[in-house]
Amino acid sequence: MKNLLTSLLCLAAFTAWGQTDILDARTNYSVGQTVTVTGIVTSDGNLGIVRYLQDETAGIALYPGGQWTQNGWPDPQPGDELTMTGALSEYNGLLEVGPDGITDVTIISTGNELPAFQDVTPSQLDESMEGELAYIQGAVFTNGGTIITGNSTFSFSAAGESGIIYVRNDNELVGQVLPAGEVDLYGVVSQFTFDGVGGYQLLPRGNEDLVPTSAINLSTQVDQINITTTSFDLVWNTDVLGDSHVEYGLTPDLGMEVVDDMQVLEHQVTVEGLEPGTIYYARVISIAGEDSTASTIRPYATVSESPGYIRAYFTTQVDNSVATIEAAQALGTNTNDTIAAYITSAQSTLDIAAYNINNSAIEQAINTAIANGVQVRYIAEGQNANLGLSAIDDSMPVHFRTDGQGSGMHNKFIVGDRDNAQNAFVLTGSTNFTTGNLNTDPNNVIILGDQSLARAYTLEFEEMWGSTGMEPDPANAKFGAAKTINTPRRFLVGGSPIELYFSPTDGTTSAILDAIESTDYDLNFAVLSFTRNDLGAAVVDAGSSLFINPVGAMENINDTGSEYETLLDAGIEIYSHNGISGQLHHKYAIVDHSQALSDPTVVTGSHNWSTTAETTNDENTLVIHDERVANLYYQEFVGLLNGMGVGITALDSDEEVCTVFPNPANDAVKVVLGAEASLGDWIRLYDGSGRVVLEEQLLMNGAALNVGHLAEGMYLIQYGQSSPARLVIQH
């Protein structure tokens, strides 16, 4: 018995202390077993909470499960020599130490030299290199020249092979321009795969890990401005002086060129002699001496000769009392008939991408269109029942997304008569074509009569379809992260600027962030799911302004990572629709609906405010800069909150007390008291920090208040204890 016990103790000692290095931990120990690893830390917070550790034999990820310091452990930094004891775990293929069984985190020394980067090709990023520093020469990004977004992958090629990098929200690279020319890539080898096979990627740790090899580079993305029916301008910046070339054409083969030899940093080239409602492909080139930089080829659209209408409809109640231009329409159970009417209005083509369908009116409308000789193509999500498809003429070709990732093909759009300028339309929004979504759940439908937009949606449809013909080509079809940036971004519909984004390739979350961060006065939002902490932080930041009171409504407040409690804790006026009849299914934001001079904007579409929508699903989002449309959505938002039993807390002037004009003001404003107010109280003007910058006693009704000495910007003006009003000063 004693000998047996001694043997067991010896075996335990070997198991606990027999490990010698990281390679030993990786190869001879299983998930759940405890290991002790020692090495040099090679990453910091740019890669999030995870830290990477490397010794002379291998590398490995360290994951504490929360903030490093919450258990009294140190926060590891690059160059630290560190020992950590914990259980092995695996997260989507990545081997980690932690978060279970951590008993020790000790920094032995600091300021050590990092291990050398291994010079590799993309195909050499594999399991044997996971957790190690690597270096790839002469990489070219597929989407070079675009803005780097957080929690996103970016494809590149090098040495005739392809690979990807992954950039977290925490990374300082977010918001910068993805290099357009050759770069030397540095970073840590990692893995992300649902099935444990492949998925190896390089994680750049910051600016120093993307090193352009050219003497001239794009310092901004290429933007399209001054769009007309026959021309547009492309603008971009370079980091050194260079000339300006635009190569363009009706196909990616290009074939035409405009050149400006002037050496500049800020480039602007007019492309003219174009056709209305047409998509052109173009790239920009700047040359400095013997070096050059070039963007990737992108599509751009001219203004169409379509009617240009923008019509918004809502499934549940609206509040027309806040209408300023046009009364919003709540269609209720007639929403399906409206969608059906647009379907049957098509004369030649219909492309439908629908997450789910089971509504008889829409099914019958599709059958009617087919019977009328309309060519109908249909894309569906393969994980759903799609019960309505069985009721549709089986001559209609249907293509399913079947990979089972996320919500999959989550779009809800219809494109009609793309080649007919007068009849072309796009129907999109938040609603699925199901009876529950249409009859019970708060949803929105938006229809735009514009050929350019219809042709852009067609490009996205056909990338998922895999062909331009009536039959899909599954071998060529692309869904999710396999898709490319293949559609124009900017449009002018009926004179209103519109931006179009398709997930997961186009950086939709960045567009939503831009809209939120542009808020000057009002921010309202209604979303099914809200789990993106970058969007949550943007809402909180907006609410920190004296001039902005964000108000939102959410359905899925208990989702993993929900921002609901975070927003509540930050003092944001956020309301839960959870438990109320019907599912709040919207995905919209309204910015500055009340101020025509502050770019009233609506963000709407199928994209929930979640990482799955950003990185995995097929989604579409419109950013519409239009005062009328913003007010229509605001009427819905007020109606939504009315139905939830809450009201709107607005920062508006109390007109019964006093009115100030003009607004915006230059040198002075006149203060006029209402019938219920009395003279003798004090007027105070507050700046953005809440500091009183002007204070005067009002002794005469209609008195002028001198503001000419104050800096331009937004202020709050208050008479006595009345509600404060916003005042803009513009000199």
Image: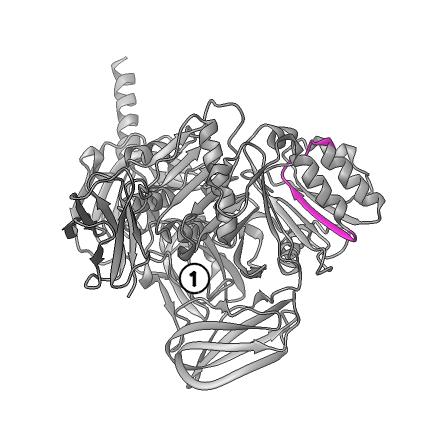
For image coordinates 22% across by 35% down, the residue present is: 70
- Kind of residue at disc 1: Val
For image coordinates 44% across by 66% down, the residue present is: 221
Task: For mark 1, give the secondary structure.
Answer: loop
Give the side of residue 91 with respect to residue 34, left or right: right
Give the side of residue 696 with respect to residue 608, left or right: left
Seen in the picture, residue 586 relative to 204 is either above or below; the reply is above
Q: Nearer the viewer, residue 479 or 671?
A: 671
Q: Which residue is mark 1?
A: 120
Task: Report the magenta residues as a range.
Answer: 347-360
Q: Quadrant of residue 177?
A: bottom left
Q: Quadrant of the C terminus?
A: bottom left
For image coordinates 15% across by 44% down, the residue present is: 680
Q: Quadrant of the N terminus?
A: top left
* Residue 594 is a magenta residue: no
The image position of residue 149, as x and y in percent, is 42, 54
The image position of residue 351, as x and y in percent, is 71, 49
The image position of residue 61, as x and y in percent, is 34, 44
The image position of residue 637, as x and y in percent, is 47, 37
Number of numbered discs: 1
Give the side of residue 247 with respect to residue 559, left or right: right
